[in-house]
Amino acid sequence: MSDADMILFSGLHLEGRMADLIVKMAARHTVVQVTDSINEKLLREPPEFAGHFDPHVWFDVSLWSTAAMRVRDALIEKDPAGRDVYTRNAEDYTKLLADLHTYAKDTIATIPEGGRVMVTAHDAFGYFGRAYGLEVRAIQGISTDSEASLRDINALVDTLVSRKIPAVFIESSVPRKTIDALVEGCKSRGHTVTIGGELFSDAMGKEGTMDGTYVGMVVHNVDTVAKALGGKVPEKKPGKLGEWAAKFKK
């Protein structure tokens, strides 16, 4: 980072203690927190995270679009000669994100209303649920370092059984043992719950693939959740999202 022309970081405590180093580097480098343009009224402050905001803002595409505009402005300030390029690219990208946001809403809406319950290992999907109409239940808190108690697991088993939820989800960056405990707990109560798929939470897919991009990561999560919970996933993505996705099929 000491050799960088500009340092972009998410903020909202996502980087943990590394944020202290990043802030110190602002004395000698251009340092930009990309989430500082998001209205604080739109940020989640879960009870267990009192005093701090939930950093997983990228799961609401409309909020992450605001962050993209912050990056555009920072680039223009650093390199005024590139204004036209940065402005044009940002305009194209935000149009793509607008289609992605609409796609997520429309696809999740195909899940039967009573079944729009998304159960995951840790509480990374609060913004996702709020933006797209899902009730999100997690075994452990926002941090992947937190641990789930037996009481938490049993409470979720009760929910899954009583509401006949068909699937739960594992995450690419979180061990699946607690999710497996949910499946076994439901089985012992006579209710079959399947693993609906693996979601990207604090990570993306393999570099060079569709899942290895922000847009592709969101599409993967939306499609995985919709399929597992009885929704419908269109074969072809609409609008600019479809044009973008087609590039990965060539």
Image (cartoon, rainbow, N blue to C red):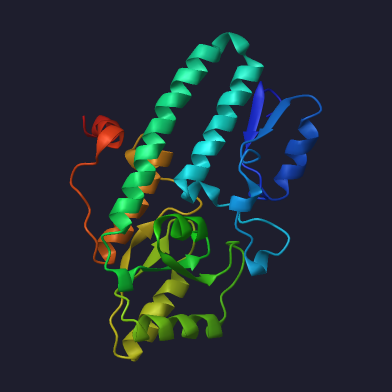
The residue drawn where x is 53% and y is 33% is 68
Q: Quadrant of residue 76?
A: top right
Q: Is 112 positioned to the left or the right of 154 in the image?
A: left
The residue drawn where x is 39% and y is 45% is 101
Residue occupying the far left of the picture: 235
Where 39 falls versus 166 (above or below)? above
Whole-percent x and y of residue 194? 29, 73
The residue drawn where x is 24% and y is 61% is 231
Q: Is 95 positioned to the left or the right of 226 in the image?
A: right
Whole-percent x and y of residue 84? 50, 12
Q: How many marks?
A: 0
Residue occupying the far top of the picture: 81
Whole-percent x and y of residue 104? 35, 50
The residue drawn where x is 43% and y is 56% is 172
Query: Quick check: can you spot residue 155?
Result: yes
Q: Quadrant of residue 210?
A: top left
